[in-house]
Image: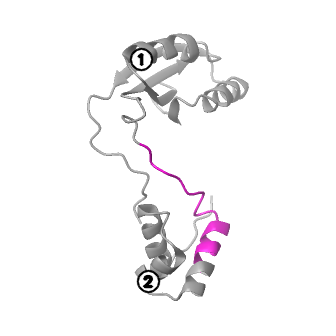
């Protein structure tokens, strides 16, 4: 993977956009000491280079009734490329799965999953996660308190 070289202004732009992606180009230009046109061109270049993959909104899990967050570790039956591709294709399609990581160590995957309550979370794991292709073992840990949640990368 190729790393893109960034100057201080690029880093300032990316940092400001991570904090508030709804900022106008004029406000962004002011924050990084550029005029509007050069600011817009730089942002466009960062988008085209793939550094900016999209713009999102952070929603309140609790206000949406998603009060349970669990981390589900999975051990797979086998490790063929076909089995992994089948599993990954299906897990990516599950909206309750916020993140999925392929791991080293005892477990092969870790999923971050949200649910309304323990009962619905448990039902989801029993009916959907257990049914994913190639799953041999499941272990779940629940978040007791979220101390930090961020999508901002250190620049």
Tell me where residue 23 appears, x and y as whole percent.
Answer: 48, 69
Q: Which is nearer the N-term, disc 1 or disc 2?
A: 2
**For this view, does 91 lie left or right of residue 64?**
right
Which disc number belongs to residue 122? Answer: none
**For this view, does 80 lie left or right of residue 55?**
right
Q: Label 1 vs label 2: CA separation?
A: 49 Å
Tell me where residue 38 appears, x and y as whole percent.
Answer: 58, 86
Q: On screen, 87 above or below 27?
A: above
Q: How is the image coloured?
A: one colour
Which residue lies at the image location 58% right of the left edge and 65% below the top edge? Answer: 3
Quarter of the picture holding the N terminus: bottom right
Q: On screen, 103 above or below 72?
A: below
Tell me where residue 18 appears, x and y as whole percent.
Answer: 45, 62
Q: Secondary structure at mark 1?
A: strand
Give the labeled residue for mark 1. Answer: 139
Q: Secondary structure at mark 2?
A: helix
In the image, 132 versus 135, the foreground residue is 132
Check residue 45 for magenta coloring. yes
What is the span of residues highlighted in magenta in the rendered image? 42-59
Residue 13 visible, this orientation = yes
Q: Mark 2 packing: few (<14 Cα in 10 Å), some, or many (20+)? A: few
Check residue 48 for magenta coloring. yes
Which residue lies at the image location 42% right of the left edge and 17% below the top edge? Answer: 139
Which residue lies at the image location 47% right of the left edge and 15% below the top edge? Answer: 138
Give the labeled residue for mark 2. Answer: 30
Q: Quadrant of residue 118?
A: top left
Q: Quadrant of residue 53?
A: bottom right
């Amino acid at each position: 993977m190729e790393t893109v070289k960034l100057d201080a202004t690029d880093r300032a732009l990316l940092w400001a956009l991570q904090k508030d992606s709804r900022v106008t180009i004029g406000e962004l230009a002011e924050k990084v000491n550029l005029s509007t046109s050069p600011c817009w061109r730089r942002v466009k270049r960062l988008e085209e280079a793939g550094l900016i993959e999209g713009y999102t909104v952070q929603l309140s899990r609790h206000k949406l009734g998603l009060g349970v967050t669990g981390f589900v570790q999975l051990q797979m039956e086998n490790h063929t490329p076909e089995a992994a591709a089948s599993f990954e294709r299906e897990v990516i399609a599950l909206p309750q799965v916020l993140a999925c990581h392929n791991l080293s160590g005892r477990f092969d995957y870790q999923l971050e999953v949200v649910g309304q309550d323990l009962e619905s979370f448990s039902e989801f794991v029993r009916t959907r996660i257990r049914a994913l292709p190639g799953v041999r073992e499941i272990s779940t840990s629940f978040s007791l308190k979220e101390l930090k949640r961020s999508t901002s990368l250190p620049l």
